[in-house]
Amino acid sequence: MSELDFKALELKVNQLIETCRLMHEKNIALTKENQTYKADRSQAIKQKDMARHQVEGMISRLKAMEH
């Protein structure tokens, strides 16, 4: 291989290394974002369940008042 071939190969390897580094950073960011979405979803489910229980309680009390 000539020196020119080695330089081209070195450039491609460096580009591959940089691409891998960027992909790793994006993966970390996406993992954190996914964790945030999961936590938000969990909180929303808890709030929905609390509201449902409150409404069910109100309905029960209203039904009891009818009698």
Image (cartoon, grey):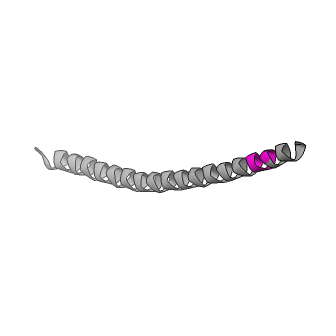
Of the pair 43 and 29, the residue shown nearer to us: 43
Of the pair 61 and 53, the residue shown nearer to us: 61
Q: Is residue 8 left or right of residue 61?
A: left
Up/down of 25 relative to 62, above or below: below
- Name the residue at 22% across, 51% down: 10
User: What percent of the width, then of the height, locates residue 37?
Assistant: 55, 51
Residue interval drawn in magenta: 55-60
Q: Is residue 28 left or right of residue 62?
A: left
Q: Is residue 26 left or right of residue 43?
A: left
The part of the image, by quadrant, that contains residue 63 is: top right
Which residue is outermost to the right? 66
Magenta stretch, overall SS: helix
Of the pair 61 and 32, the residue shown nearer to us: 61
The part of the image, by quadrant, that contains residue 67 is: top right
User: What percent of the width, then of the height, locates residue 61?
Assistant: 81, 49
User: What percent of the width, then of the height, locates residue 43?
Assistant: 60, 55
